Amino acid sequence: MRTYLDHNATTPLRAEARAAMVAAMDVAGNPSSVHAEGRAAKMLVERARAQVAALVGCLPTQVVFTGSATEAAALAVAQKHRHGGVFAALPTEHDCLRVWSEVEMPSPIGRDGVPLAGLQKQLSDLAGDHSVERAALVAMSAANSETGILTHAGKVLGSVDGANGTAGYSVICDITQVAGKMPVVYDAATPSYAILSAHKLGGPKGIGALINFTREDPEPMLRGGGQEMGRRSGTENVIGIAGFGAAAEAASRDVAAGRWEEVAEHRDLLEQAVEAASKVTILVGKDAPRLPNTSCMITAGWKGETQVIQMDLSGFAISAGSACSSGKVRASAVLHAMGYDETEASSAIRVSLGLETTSEQVLRFADSWAAKLAKHGIRAA
């Protein structure tokens, strides 16, 4: 029997999302149409908008539905001209943001996962240094998808020295991994933008959202019919949006009920078993604030891709990093940025649990992984 331990890559579809999507399939109208059928489709979209807003703590009008968190990231970055400078992403950001970065930024965390002192001062200095290109829009995730480390102790960091980048810098915050696992808590100031994705919290794949906290609507990248209040053209994916909304509402209930506390207990049980089996394996960020479900494990010299394949053959689905890049044979850029060397960064695996993961499953994984580690040690000797 297979065991799925790759929930940070994507989550199984929630029953609530499935039911909402099936119901939406019977709604024939286009949400831009003014007749009764169109208004029925529009109602589904607006209900989901309110459900997503409730999950992330914003106004429904601030939610812009997109095809993915990646599209939401691109739409946010495209607004950089409004913030008075170029865009920069921290080196521990997801590829969907890091690929746009125009300025080299410092790592926010060290090898132990503890936030490095003075990061905000470095960012403020860079934003105000007119001898270099001014980084006025900066990407900072609330939690890292590969390590689970809460970059800002679980808070969504807001813009510094004034909203919307009037001074200092403005923030795009990736809340994709936090939303649905923890309460979305903002710092003293909200960011300018936040991004998230439905399939990370039990919704369907292919639907995401940009949360726009600025006073101005984002200028669209996709132009045409003027859907999403002119912010993103293209007929709305009503079925996907309905599933997103239902998943967001269900995820909010689970967070409020404290269901992820038990997941954290299962993660700790897994890590205890790993530590008992191996004295050389590094549990990245073990003593730092982390997502409740994520373990990043480095066993130097044992390739992450090899471990993924071996565990897959044993019936366990895990990853060697972000799902968007784990198919590529390369060391983790995130771990490099944290100070791990090439051998270490290429020897990492990520195990990410879900609400339905049991203690029996994590212990079976640990036993199987330990057996593979023993064989690896014999071959390497």
Image: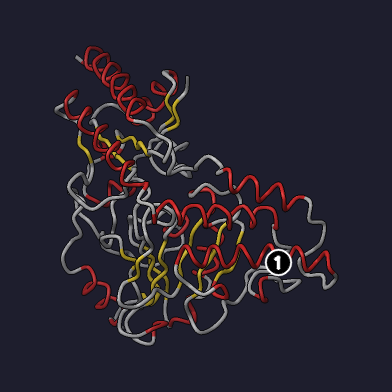
Residue 69: x %, y % from top left? 52, 57
Residue at image position (39%, 82%) is 165
Dot 1: few (<14), some (14–19), or many (≥20) neighbours within 10 Å? some
- Extreme residue in the right direction: 35
User: Is 102 situated above or below 299?
Assistant: below
Residue 58: x %, y % from top left? 48, 72
User: Is 157 situated above or below 26?
Assistant: below
Residue 180: x %, y % from top left? 44, 54
Q: Relative to residue 248, is residue 356 drawn left or right?
A: left
Residue at image position (35%, 45%) is 146
* The quadrant where residue 192 appears: bottom left
Residue 281: x %, y % from top left? 20, 31
Of residues 109 and 331, the one drawn nearer to the viewer in this rendering:
109
Residue at image position (18%, 61%) is 116
Q: Relative to residue 127, is residue 309 drawn left or right?
A: right
Quarter in which the C terminus is drawn:
top left
**Residue occupied by mark 1:** 43
- Extreme residue in the front direction: 257
Q: How many marks?
A: 1
Amino acid type assigned to the residue bearing label 1 in the image: Met
User: Is 342 situated above or below 300?
Assistant: below
Of residues 151 and 178, the one drawn nearer to the viewer in this rendering:
178
* The quadrant where residue 373 appears: top left
Label 1 SS: helix
Q: Relative to residue 331, is residue 200 drawn left or right?
A: right
Residue at image position (79%, 51%) is 26
